[in-house]
């Protein structure tokens, strides 16, 4: 099963075939609904009029990229910060992986190395890196030895915790319930 979000079918197809779009969706997946985050790479392509590669985005004029992100409807709640973050991630791809997003996971020795590589990306803390490792393993067959362990609870086969577990409306509902319960638990712990 591949990732299946309730977004434009073309946006879902882009996520299936483009490692860069998938990675950028994950970059944008914070403080906005996951549907917004993962559909924004498709909207960015529409605004550009073509599908960019990591080199193009890394070298894009920062003000012009911010303008693309801020154009209504904005690609993210924080268009300036997230345009910069996308550019930073693309620069890492260019510097370390010759501009190839799939180079991030190609030829990794094991899940720990994959988690380390993902965790070295700008804006990827431990949790976000684990979610992306789970997403790669569960939906994109990137499964080096130990990937589930590296992904922590997000790698569990029967988990409904993150975008990695969304394959249909029912799984999306279960992920949302998990997130709401986690937020309520965190709020109660603060009280």
Image (spheres, grey):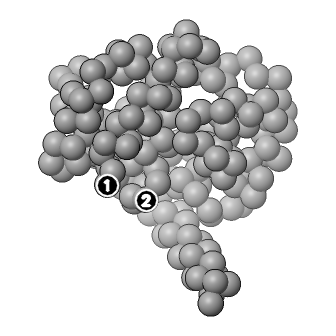
Mark 2 is surrounded, within 10 Å at the Cα level, by few (under 14), some (14 to 19) or many (20 or more) other residues, namely few
Left or right of residue 124, residue 156 in this image: right
Residue indicated by mark 1: 77
169 and 125: which is toward the camera: 125
Q: Which residue is pictured at 59% across the width and 33% down the height?
A: 121
Tell me the residue at 54%/20% (across/down): 93
Q: Nearer the viewer, residue 67 or 135?
A: 67
Residue 56 horizontal/vertical position (percent): 35, 15
Give the image quarter of residue 107: top right
109 over 10 or under it: above or below: above
Which residue is at a point 56% across and 70% down the rendered structure image?
Answer: 179
* Residue at numbered disc 2: 31
User: What secondary structure is marked by label 1?
Assistant: loop
Q: Report whether 72 appears left or right of 86.
A: left
Q: Which mark is residue 18?
A: none
Tell me whether circle 2 and circle 1 mark residues in contact (CB < 8 Å): yes
- Tell me the quarter of the image containing the C terminus: bottom right
The image quarter in which residue 45 lies: top left
The spot of residue 18 in percent (x, y) is 44, 26
Rate crowding at label 1 as few (under 14), some (14 to 19) or many (20 or more) other CA atoms within 10 Å: some
Q: Earlier in the sequence, mark 2 or mark 1?
A: 2
Task: Identify the residue at image location x=68%, y=19%.
Answer: 106
Q: Split into 4 quadrants, where in the image is the N terminus?
A: top right
Residue 59 at x, y percent in the picture: 36, 16
Label 2 residue SS: loop
Classify residue 40 as left or right of residue 177: left
Q: Is residue 141 visible?
A: no
Percent coordinates x, y for residue 128 in the rendering? 61, 48
């Amino acid at each position: 099963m591949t990732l299946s979000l309730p977004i434009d079918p073309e946006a879902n197809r882009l996520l299936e075939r483009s490692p860069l779009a998938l990675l950028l969706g994950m970059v944008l997946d914070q403080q906005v609904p996951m549907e917004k985050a993962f559909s924004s790479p498709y909207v960015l392509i529409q605004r550009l009029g073509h599908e960019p590669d990591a080199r193009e985005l890394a070298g894009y004029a920062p003000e012009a990229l911010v303008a693309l992100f801020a154009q209504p409807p904005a690609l993210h709640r924080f268009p300036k910060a997230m345009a910069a973050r996308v550019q930073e991630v693309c620069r890492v791809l260019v510097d370390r992986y010759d501009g190839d997003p799939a180079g991030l996971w190609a030829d990794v020795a094991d899940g720990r190395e994959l988690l380390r590589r993902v965790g070295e990306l700008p804006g990827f803390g431990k949790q976000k890196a684990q979610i992306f490792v789970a997403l790669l393993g569960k939906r994109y067959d990137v499964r080096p030895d130990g990937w589930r362990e590296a992904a922590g609870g997000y790698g569990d086969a029967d988990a409904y915790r993150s975008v990695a577990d969304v394959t249909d409306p029912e799984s999306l509902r279960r992920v949302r319930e998990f997130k709401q319960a986690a937020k309520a638990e965190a709020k109660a712990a603060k009280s």
